[in-house]
Image (cartoon, rainbow, N blue to C red):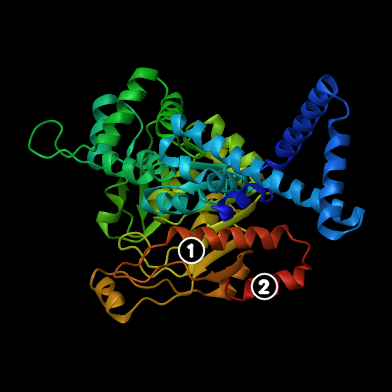
Amino acid sequence: MWHSAWRWLYPGLRIKRWVLLFSVGLLLLVLGLTTIINYQVFGVLEEFLFRVLYEMTGRYNYTLLAGVGAVLIIVGALVMIFSFQRLMQRILQSIAPEGSGKVSQMMLERARRDRGPAIVSIGGGTGLSKLLRGLKTKTSHLTAIVTVADDGGSSGRLREEMDIIAPGDLRNCLVAMADKESQMEYIFQHRFGGTGELAGHSLGNLFLAALMEEYKDPVLALEAASEILNVRGEVVPATTEPVRLRAEMTDGVCVIGESEIPEYGGRIQRLHILPDMPQAVTAALAAIEAADVITLGPGSLYTSILPNLLVPEIATALRRSDATKIYICNAMTQPGETDGYTVADHLRALIDHIGPGVADYVLVNDYAPAGEVLERYAAMGSYPVVCDTEAVQALGAKVVRAKLIADGMTVSHAPDLVADAIVNMVHAVQSDLHPQLLDYYFDRSL
């Protein structure tokens, strides 16, 4: 109980100032009452304490009297803190019953997030949603810029039938950033079965499609969805135009459609977006301009990350930004997209499409999965991405190694590990370390 009470005095909660003001007000109230009732009340109290102390010690001693006063102050302060805590809990029981028992902890976490950096994460697919799950615990200033080029499954059907942007990746990001993530994920990821028109659709996709139809504007629809889901941050599409992807393969074949590109199985030479000059969402450009940190990935290089950067205004804003730019490289190659790619190949593909200045740092996993896990992935044509540090440095970026994946039978980025690595990088960059010391720090594993 007392540990919980002391937590109200932790730095950053902005509570102590109000407790102090409350104490001053209480003191003025007591002084006012004693002035009205009897101005000698404090004198009588002091005389009483002197007599009690004299009976106990046999002498008058101001030090003892001061000690009694100090004890009374401490007891009074503890009583005030305890009563204030109980008062807040009682109020929150009516507003947010599920969080009323841990008010100070919630406020402390919120205060820490409020002091976090402004982070913009660009990407799509499961890679981006996993990253957002970790970053939302680190900062309140989080914006996800999401690809809308998906044309397969439920998203593809809704695109064609309703002439809207693909809702699938937007849905995943909203769920990942929702305050009650587990409940929202259970509901929004539900897919209808059967053979009717709803078969294969997810409830979350239908929810977003309904909002887009109602508001006539995807950005307004996402703002409404964010309010409903109590999203920590902002989810915005790269563009509100229903774009598609066209890939030129090294064998001369052109493949159209985000879902068709990996299925073709060739090596991608160049990626294009159709139409080739879609207009960027204003909120996305504003977020990039105000960002302290911009992350790219993790996720499919050609079908999740590059589609955002092929929107000309976003590419220009990214290159001009003074933010710390971090490319989070995939841990494994992706069949049909990045077969045989090294870390430098990933970065080179980004530079070839939008020019230099895309990344200051490349965050690379340095934790080796178990042998049986690698064998299972090898059977699917997926292998660990080799980190060729010197080649990355030749492209103008620094390599930062860290453990980014958790133990298990799948190789995927762990939200908490990636978020911790990014925050550690940001703190190091924003420190006053000499450039040589900073390079030494990044040469070590985070």
- Disc 2, disc 1: CB below 8 Å? no
Q: Nearer the viewer, mark 2 or mark 1?
A: 1
Residue that carries the numbered disc 2 in the rendered image: 441
Q: Label 2 is placed on what type of residue?
A: Tyr
Look at 71% across and 42% down and name the residue there. 16
Q: Is residue 266 left or right of residue 280?
A: left
Question: Vertically, is 248 above or below 140?
Answer: below
> What is the C-alpha distance between the residues marked 2 and 1?
18 Å
Q: Secondary structure at mark 2?
A: helix
Mark toward the start of the polypeptide (2 vs 1) = 1
Q: Is residue 86 left or right of residue 46?
A: left
Residue that carries the numbered disc 1 in the rendered image: 417
Q: Secondary structure at mark 1?
A: helix
Q: Is residue 109 left or right of residue 77?
A: left
Structural crowding at the residue carrying mark 1, measured as other residues with C-alpha within 10 Å and reported as few (<14), some (14–19) or many (≥20) = some
Question: Looking at the image, which is closer to me, 239 or 16?
Answer: 16
Q: Of all residues shown, which one is farthest toward the bottom?
A: 371
Q: Label 1 is placed on what type of residue?
A: Leu
User: Is residue 240 something that shows in the picture?
Assistant: no
Question: Looking at the image, which is closer to me, 148 or 177?
Answer: 177
Look at 12% across and 40% down and name the residue there. 193
